[in-house]
Structure formats: structure tokens, C-alpha cells
Image (spheres, rainbow, N blue to C red):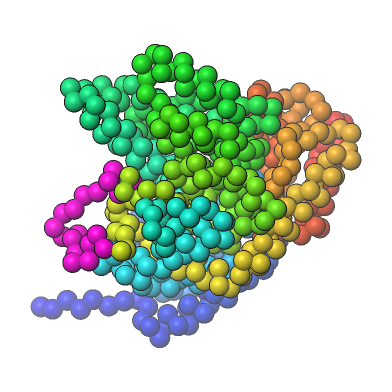
Amino acid sequence: MSCILSTNMDSKEFRIRGQEMVNYIVDYLENIRERMPMPNVVPGFLKELIPDEAPLEGESWQEIQKDIERVIMPGVTHWNSPHFHAYFPTANSYPAILGDMLSDAISCIGFTWASGPSCTELEVSMMDWLAKILQLPKHFLFSEQGKGGGIIQGTASEATLVALLSARTNVIKTVKADNPDLTTGQILDKLIAYTSEESHSSVERAGLIGLVQMRTLPTDDRGSLRIDILEETIAQDQQKGLIPFFLCATIGTTSTCSFDNLSEIGPICNHHDIWLHVDAAYAGSACICPEFRYLLDGIEHAMSFNFNPHKWLQVTFDCSAMWIKDRDLVSGAFEMNPVYLKHENQGHAMPDYRHWQIPLGRRFRSLKLWFVLRSYGVSGLQKQIRKDVQLAHQFEALVRDDPKFEIVREVTLGLVCFRLKASNEANEMLLKKINDDHRIHLVPSKIKDKFFLRFAVCATSTQPSDVGFAWSVIQELTHSLIQ
């Protein structure tokens, strides 16, 4: 007896439902101001809205579509709301959405050149495009005669981990060459990596995954890691018999958008054969503007560099751009060549990106980057960044004009850190009032025992009126707190 497989949606219906979904997406984004930026639900809410088991028979798309608003939207955090001012932006644009749609339709898993030639080669070109826009050193380009090149990782956390594991593998090889009697475990016990006390938690997590000690170093009063602290720490660790091998510097920290001094610490890393990785997840996008390119001064000393176009360059998540000075040091750390992955063009001009990343499979992410860069042009992306920075300074001015508040750290890009001139407890109470109110959403941070609130310009659609609205909410709730 034959079994005929059927689908609930054929190509004819897909044309109709696809257009309906596009219309739904446009309506959602155009009217997102009307939704609370944060959902007002409790853990477990969704379980009460759906059955305990999957349906035995397929349901009509009309039934499924009705449940988007009933089941999904009540628990959605609307990152692209102009009233969402938490964390950092998550970029979004119609060209990027179209890129993801086409990527999903093509469905290639581009782990080798042969598994998706266009997937690999477009990524190579897009990474060179981005590198040139950022005026990165030529040794990061594929198109030059050096060993550099770029790859799109999923997140900055992945990029940091890949850099650390690559550095770890190469230092172990070097030490073993000079000390063949040492085991890998004995060498691991001696390895020490560094980052600043204000770097993202993913850096310390990379150390945990990589089984290496990660030492956090103090910063100056501007949140910057400086040369004196680094040199002193390296000397102390070397005297203890430890092997400094990796440093993750940050350009645009999550807490306050502060910047490590690459021009100072870079030469020290080079002198001691320490792999310098630069995490510019948020702030890197701003460096396409000539007035912010100075933030990357000293990048020529880095072995690897990363930033997230999916934060501020209108490219949907996930798209994290990473460059490596010597691609052999990364591919050599991860390379495995089972017979079923070999192909006749292996090792030629184009990379097999599976050797540069943690997972084997990878999406056709360069499509959406290509669509966005062509649709906006460099000038269009610069205009968006400058607009957002101007909005941040608008909010900064409002804070400075109110004697009840103070600014925490310098405002350089699209983040303003501020607090009541009061105790940490009072600022915690204010934050709770703001988020319980649900009209806007903020998150806090804490530096050197000082608790403060972060105001980030996140949504592409944010306007001066949205900044004014946010400040009016904060003032209203501050007044009720004082009362």
C-alpha cells in the first residue's frame, strides 16, 4: 500500500500567504509604537495558550495565522520599538528581511566552497567591502597577498571564543615545540588570558569554555584599559611562571560604551606574542563615519577584530563580522577533513569556512549584508548612525538640565548613562518604576559600585519626539518617587 505525502501549503497558497505575511510584518513595524516595548506576562504564560501536544492532523494556515496575535505577540519584547532603550540596538530593515527570506529559500549549508560557491564567495567579497569601508589595515583583506580575511560569525561571543581557542591552540604548539616533555594539560595550567573589568561577560565565558584562566584588569576613570596596568600584570604573571597568551580589548563596552586604548596596549601585546582580539560589537558600526574612525586607532596591532552589523548597520540578526590577520592560525586550530567533506577545489583561493568557526553548518548570511549595503549605500548608513548619536546627545542635554540627575561617563555614541544624584537604592527604585510602568524600557548597569540607568537609542525609527517622550516619563516617575 503506497503512502502519499502531502503538504498543507502548496506553491499557489504560499504566494498568497507569503504576501499576507509581508503585509503583517509591514503593519507590525509601522505600528510598533502602539505596543508596549516589554511584554506584561509571567513565566509559563504561553503554556496556557497552546495544547499540551502537537496536532495529529495538519491545521489550516488561517487557524495558525490567527494565533500569532493571540499566542505569540503577548510575550514579544519589541526591540524595534522607539520606546525600547535597553541593551544595544538590534538592526532591522526591509532589504535585510528580504535577504533572510532568500537565504531560507535557498537553504544551502555553506560549510565548504563546494557546498555553496556563491555562499562562500559573496561572503569573501562582503567582508572585503566592510573592511574597506572601515579603513581596516590591508592585512585583513582577502583581496591582498597576505594571509588575512573575514568571516561572518553568528555573534560577537562566537568571534571571541574562536579567537581565544585559536590563540590557545597556537601557543600550545609553540610551547610544545620548545618543551616536548610537557603535556597539553601542563601547558593549559600555565596559560593566562586578559580582559578589562568592563568587557562583556562573554569574554570571561570564553575563558571558562577554553579552560584557561581569565584575569580581569582594572580600568581608568574613563573605563579604558591602559598600558601601565597591562605591563605590570604581564610582568607579575611571567614571574609566577605563567604564559600570557591572549587579550580581549573592547571598543564600546556594554555598560558605558567606553574604549580601551589600542594604540597603547597593542604594541605591548605584539612584544609579548599575546594574541590581541578587539571586540567592537556595538561601536564598530559607527567607525564607518570618518568622525568616529579614531576609535579604531591602533587596530593594526590586532590579530583579530569583530563587530556586529546586526546591531547598527540595518542587518537583521545574526551577522557578526570577524577579521583575522593570519587565517592559517584559525583554520589550523579547527581543521578536520573527513572524506565526505573533501572536494577537488579544496585549498585553492577560496576558504572552507567550516575551519573558521565553531559549528559545521552556516547560513547564507552575506545575502542580507549585500542587499543592505547596496540599498543604503555607505552614506545612507552613516546618516542613520549620525541621527542616532544626535538623539543620544539630545537626551544627554535633557539630563544635564535637570539638577536631580547626573551623567555617568562621557557620551560618545548612542548610549547615555545617567542616574539620580541619590543612593543606589533610589536609582534601583526608579528603574523598577520605569519598567513596571511599561511605557518605555531601560536596563541598568553598575561600575565601581555605582548603580546607574542606561538609555540607548535602539530603534531605527526613533525620533526626537520619542526621546522627549522617554524623558517626560522618567521625570513623571521620578516626581512620584520623590513624593
Determine the residue positioned at 24% across, 48% down. 335
Taking the spot 60% from the left edge, 28% from the top edge, the residue there is 226
Q: Position of residue 1 (x, y in %)?
A: 10, 78
Question: What x and y, as percent, mark residue 200?
Answer: 53, 37
From which residue to which does the magenta span run?
330-348
Picture residue at 48% right of the left edge, 42% below the top:
302
Q: Nearer the viewer, residue 461 or 482?
A: 461
Tell me residue 199's x, y (percent): 55, 34
Residue closest to the far top: 240
Question: Which residue extends farthest bottom?
Answer: 12
Answer above or below: position of 119 versus 50.
Answer: below
Left or right position of 131 against 422 = left
Q: Quadrant of the C terminus?
A: top right
How many marks do you count on the picture?
Answer: 0
Percent across and percent down for residue 28 are: 62, 67
In-front residue for pair 331/320: 331
Q: Kindly indicate the quadrant of the structure image that contains residue 403.
A: top right
Q: Nearer the viewer, residue 224 or 347?
A: 347
* 342 within the magenta span: yes
Residue 42 is at least partly visible in this image: no
Residue 171 vertical position relative to residue 329 in the rendered view, above or below: above
Residue depicted at 36% across the width and 81% down the height = 10
Q: 294 left or right of 229?
A: right
Q: Is residue 323 visible?
A: yes
Residue at the far left: name it: 1
In the image, is residue 441 part of the stretch drawn in magenta?
Answer: no
Please determine whether, in this image, residue 119 is positioned above or below residue 399: below
Does 5 sit left or right of 171 as displayed? left
